[in-house]
Image: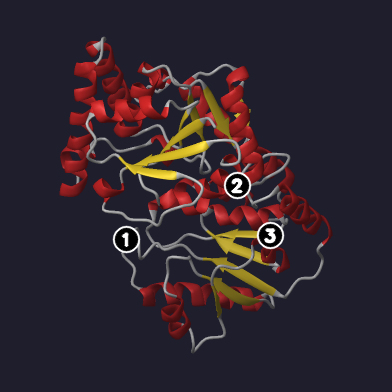
Amino acid sequence: MDTIVFYVHRTGLLNYFLSPICDYLSKDYKITVLHLDKKNGYHSDEFETFNKVDISDFSITQIKNLLADISPKAVITLGFVSIYELLILRIAKSMGFRLIYLEHGIYSKDTVSLPYSKILISFKTTLFKNIFFIKKYLAFALQSKSTMREINTLYRLLFKKEYRKLGFDKAIFFSEHGCQNINKLFNLNESNVLFSNYPLVNSNAEYEEYKKISLTNNQKNKKAIYIHQPFIKDKLVDWKYDDEKSFILNIEEETRNINLGLDLLIHPREDFKFYDDLYKDTSINILQNIEKKDYANYELAIGHYSTALLYPIFFRIPLWIVNYGNNILQSTSVFKEINSYHCKNTTNYDEFIRSFVGIGKCSFENVSDTVKSAIKN
């Protein structure tokens, strides 16, 4: 059986994105996932459908020997802006392996705005990591047949943000939005670009079920759902949890004015008991890890820029995009253009879905089929 290789910085991507794809790919390929968990201070569980290799302590020679032993049909990355992603791509390209880019999140301005100024001014951990990455890349350049070309490629990536020399043979995008914004950086011909649609569900059969619900469901629960994000936990704002509670209570007051109750869907990384206790003196219902098709039962969905908003959009639920404290990331949200709450005109959901989600089977099964096509053709 042929082998393929994925590279990810941290294996945190595996559970929610890569693992479902590999469940399908493993029927046709042996899969190895290269990662830097040790360097990132991260640990994850083992997976049955693929082998994980932590290359944090690998030398350039060891990485080359590993790839030579595996001899993959393709090396696939889920990103392209970091120094280490460049390193893996350049090593694999120098060895003649096919390179594939796989989009894994809706494109925003932040996708290609990696702040390399942090090399000089950031916190100590980030500084040391970037020094480690640069030293590793320079070691590769010195061992290559074209040292100055490889150093120039690094320079242009870091300071010019020129990604055309990454060497991708194929790129897989969810939809037109990702292709229009990212492929102009890659400059790949149309024949080397594939579309997979954003994976809303696991299988193609589930997608057909969701599609039917989106067209026929008229049973609403007279509630709004607020899709929470862990801004406080991730230190993206200077709020405390009591500040957040006041903010959400103001949202509840507005939903109550239009005769809707409010469910608070907290992020999977948050502590359910903590939130349940914090809001026990309110009429707000705390939820976590709901079935995606349950979004179809709400009258209104409230949130910021999470891709979880794609589900209520798919089910044609009106959106209310709200600002959260001083979080600067919300300014890049692609969802602002589909904010329909208090708007006079009906939002064009179909156009948004076509541009950002894609038309056709929106499933991990379909993504895996697209990856197979990129490998074979």
Q: Residue at x 71, y 50 (%)?
A: 347
Amino acid type at mark 3:
Pro
- Residue 348 appearing in the image: no
Amino acid type at mark 1:
Lys
Question: For the C terminus, which image quadrant?
Answer: top right
Q: Which mark is residue 337?
A: 2
The spot of residue 172 in percent (x, y) is 56, 31
Q: Element under label 2?
A: helix
Tally the numbered discs.
3
Residue toward you, 54 or 27: 27
Disc 3 versus disc 1: distance between alpha carbons? 29 Å
The residue at the far front in this view is: 1
Disc 2 versus disc 3: distance between alpha carbons? 12 Å
Left or right: 138 with respect to 214? left
Q: Residue at x 33, y 30 (%)?
A: 66
- Residue 100 appearing in the image: yes
Question: CB atoms at circles 2 and 1 under 8 Å apart?
Answer: no
The residue at the far bottom in this view is: 281
- Residue under numbered circle 3: 318
The spot of residue 298 in percent (x, y) is 69, 68
The spot of residue 45 in percent (x, y) is 40, 57
Question: For the N terminus, which image quadrant?
Answer: top right
Residue toward you, 98 or 249: 98
Amino acid type at mark 2:
Glu
Q: Element under label 1?
A: loop
Q: Element under label 3?
A: loop
Question: CB atoms at circles 3 and 1 under 8 Å apart?
Answer: no
- Residue under numbered circle 1: 235
